[in-house]
Amino acid sequence: MKKAIAPLLSILLTACNGAGTGIRSDQTVGDSSEPTPTEPVAHTVDLPTVQCRGELPEVLESITSGYRLAQESDFVPAIRNFDPDYTVDEDFTCSIFTDDFTGDGSPDYALLLVNETTADFQAMFAVNEGNGQFSPLVLKEYQRVTEPEDGVVYTSLSYKPAGEEGLALRDYARLEPAQREAYVARPAITLWRSIIQDEEGRPEDVTELSTLAYCSDAYYFVEGSLQTFQVCD
């Protein structure tokens, strides 16, 4: 019995060695036939799910060079010191959310980033390309109006999961029925827009939350296309 097993093990080892050199099981050395084409394998990575606050995923470092995630201390005092218990249980100092914003089955990120040199800041979508790579889609760039140590971020990044009404509940959300349905059905983010701005779009007063949050801009995707609308109270 042992004599019968030895040749079999030799054959199996030869087959394994051939697989490691790119030789198919049905192809011998010197065979000029072309191997059967195979579909390319998509590169996948283990992507963390981060909501509101956390570390910037390593896979996004190449598209956020020179920027970092906004921290709670980066927000102006009117936002940072606001007590949400008086209204809704919501954190207004968030800087990162994860969801399939584009609807293609892959997780994307919404980010609020501060420039490490100038302390200007920006909001962006990091759009998953499905191959382990992300593309930046900058929604809005902001110029700081205060000194960095006093807090520079004067907007808020909020997240609306799919199925929730979000800004559609606001009294002045004048949306067409189809637009409202599309917005409610999809995940979205919201950015505040100050009611009083200078010619550069900077708020003239960052001391009152009611002024900073008077208007809100919604951003969401429909069939891969970015959509937006504004609601002001």
Image (cartoon, helix red, strand yellow):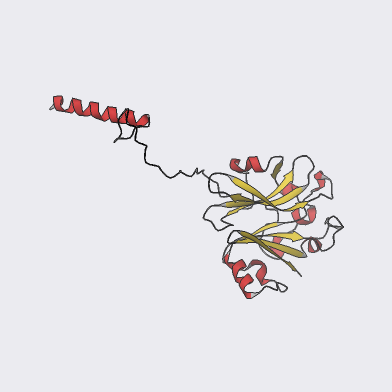
The quadrant the C terminus occupies is bottom right
Horizontal side of residue 25 vs 184, given as left or right: left
Quadrant hosting residue 185: bottom right
Which residue is more in the foreground, 141 or 57?
A: 141
Question: Toward the viewer: 71 or 216?
Answer: 216
Nearest the camera: 117 or 38?
38
Q: Specify whether 66 is left or right of 58.
A: right
Q: Vertically, is 31 above or below 87?
A: above
Residue 151 locus on image (x, y percent)? 79, 48
Image coords of residue 41 (percent x, y):
45, 43
Q: Is residue 61 above or below residue 225?
A: above
Residue for point 69% across, 40% down? 65
Residue at x 64%, y 66% (from the top left corner) = 166
Q: Residue at x 73, y 50 (%)?
A: 122
Q: Quadrant of the N terminus?
A: top left
Q: Residue furthest left?
A: 1
Residue at x 51% of width, y 55% of height: 105
Taking 233 as reference, is 159 left or right? left
Q: Percent position (x, y) of residue 150? A: 82, 47
Query: Residue 103 appears at what percent x and percent y?
Result: 55, 58
Q: Total of numbered circles in the picture? A: 0
Does residue 144 appear to the left or right of 56 in the view shown? right
- The correct choice, above or below, for 8 with respect to 114 in the image is above
